[in-house]
Image: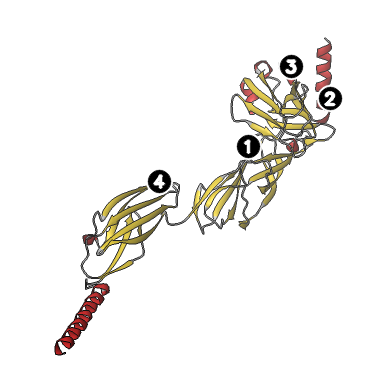
Amino acid sequence: MQKRIVLALFVLVSLAGYAAAYEVPLSTFGFGGIELNGPFGEKCQTISIDMADKVTLAEGQGVLSIHATFDKADNDNSYISLSVDGGTEKIIWPERMTCGETCWSRVFLPELSKGITNLNLCLKTGTYTNSAVISENSFIGFYDTPVLWIENRAPTQIFLGQRAMMSIIIKNTGSKDANISAQFVQEDTRSLVEIKSFDIIEGDSSVTTTIKAGETREFFYFIKPSAASSYNLSSAALFFDNVFNERQMIVSNHPQMKVLIPNQIEVSLVGTEERNGVLRLKLIAKNNWDSFYEGKILFSPSDLIFDSNQDISIAPSATQEISVRTKTLTPGSYSFSASVTDSNNSYSTQNIQYDVKREGFPIEIVMAVIAIILATAVILWVYKGKNKN
């Protein structure tokens, strides 16, 4: 009887500030709260919520309200995690919670109206957190509320020099209109990878508008990266006043985008003389893209080069070297080059000039012969002088 009175008082107090069709603490479903003392701690609880017998009361949209406290969690890596029915883990950082006398995180749970819902709720403390608690008084409820969702979309890849059209999609699947403001580029100090933000070259960086119940809106802006690379782009943030009279923030995903050099293949040619009249040619081919390259190589002039026509396959973002040799070249001037072609494009190297000179007597031999002739002449002159005497 006493538990029923406490529960009734809890619901009445909750209803005083806002209208709830149904609201109940998580302790009703066996949740005993989670408490950690000291850094580097982690505890989880799974809560199974069955709303099948509450369908007539559950008119509205499901919301989970998590009541938590962190002691000295500033700039720390403490957090709450939540997964629903084994789905993707949602991370709730302390600074993302709404705090007055107490701190709350409100999470939309449309799954609650579909039957049994399994929540896995975890608490983790970082390096400098002395203690952290998720209260057993955390609760679920159904409300006449907007249910908002924001997504940041980007093209998967563009070429360097092009601009990228970014898309912000905001959806309201709830039962009530929402007055929202959205910031399309939001700083995220909690990302595990480097976030790259770009100046918006066309379009607005924010919007303030009304999203009606059941409505989806899309907003566009353009950015222009200045270097070829893979980017983890900034998230967007949406702000609105929820049914608890709090200013709530919802953060979007981080879209991924690759900026590619326009030419998939870069080629160059290097020549090295192996012996008189024979040249070794080396083609260096670099694949600038993240996809395999398949093509054919043609060394020119082909009639002077062994294996002048070959297939080539280069792994993504890799470099490959192909070497060939010329036939023995007769005296003269030659120009060599190579090209790599596929079904769409052709890539050519620079020309390499190579001269083959006519063979003659080396200067050392000529000098030696002259020296022998001079020595012989001197000996003959001395010999003739002695005979005269």
Q: Residue at x 84, y 19 (%)?
A: 9
User: In the rendering, which numbered label is found on residue 113?
Assistant: none
Up the image or down, 73 lies above or below 313; here it is: above
Tell me the distance, in whole angstroms, between the alpha carbons under discs 4 and 2.
64 Å
Residue that protrudes farthest toward the bottom in the picture: 388
User: In the rendering, which numbered label is found on residue 28?
Assistant: 3
Q: Residue at x 20, y 67 (%)?
A: 330
Q: Residues within 10 Å of mark 1 (few under 14, many from 20)?
A: some
The one nearer the camera, 220 or 129, is 129
Disc 2 + disc 3, Cβ < 8 Å: no
Disc 1 + disc 3, Cβ < 8 Å: no
Q: Say whether disc 4 or disc 1 marks the residue closer to the N-terminus.
A: 1
Tell me the distance, in whole angstroms, between the alpha carbons under discs 4 and 1.
47 Å
Q: At label 1, which amino acid type do we have?
A: Gly
Q: Say whether disc 2 or disc 1 marks the residue closer to the N-terminus.
A: 2
Q: At label 3, which amino acid type do we have?
A: Thr
Q: Which residue is mark 1?
A: 214
Quadrant hosting residue 243? top right
